[in-house]
Amino acid sequence: MAAKSDAINTQFRVKFRAQDSLHGFSDYKTEYEGDIPNELVTRDYNRFTLALGKLKIPDEALRPGINVDIEVVATRSLGIRSAKQTISWQGAISKSR
């Protein structure tokens, strides 16, 4: 089973959108969209950790209180077969402690 798991290729793509309602903007603006480089993906068996904070997202889109919409698409492939899974999250960036 482990050998099969290692043979499955997993690629991640992210779309990061931000809404700055404090400054009168009501629409979400795409701040980053693209593949997540392999060096920002850590794998522990079947768990993947994505270092989204290391992507080139403008600082103003990461300020506390900014509403964000993050969509991650994972594409897993083995040979000619592939499957996609989409994970979405919406919320406000919390204030750092």
Image (spheres, helix red, strand yellow):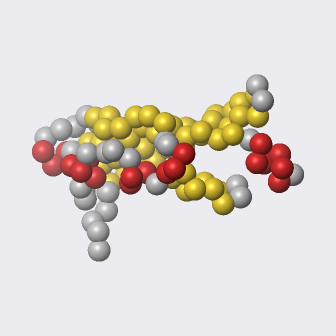
| Residue that sits furthest to the left in the current view | 23
Give the residue displayed 29% in from the left and 74% down from the top: 97
| Residue that sits furthest to the bottom in the current view | 97
Give the residue displayed 15% in from the left and 49% down from the top: 22
On the image, the x and y values in percent for residue 78 come to 76, 34
Q: Is residue 24 left or right of residue 49?
A: left
| Residue that sits furthest to the front in the current view | 39
Residue 72 visible in the displayed image: no
Nearer-the-camera pick, 5 or 61: 5
Up-down relation of residue 52 to residue 73 (above or below): below
Instruction: Tell how many labels.
Output: 0
Up-down relation of residue 81 to residue 90 (above or below): above
Q: Is residue 52 left or right of residue 73?
A: left
On the image, the x and y values in percent for residue 24 come to 13, 41
Image quadrant where residue 45 sits: bottom right
Up-down relation of residue 79 to residue 71 (above or below): above
Give the residue displayed 49% in from the left and 36% down from the top: 35
On the image, the x and y values in percent for residue 44 come to 66, 60
Nearer-the-camera pick, 93 or 46: 46
On the image, the x and y values in percent for residue 33 come to 40, 34
| Residue that sits furthest to the right in the current view | 1
Q: Is residue 1 left or right of residue 49?
A: right
Q: Is residue 24 left or right of residue 8?
A: left
Give the residue displayed 69% in from the left and 39% down from the top: 9
Residue 56 visible in the displayed image: yes
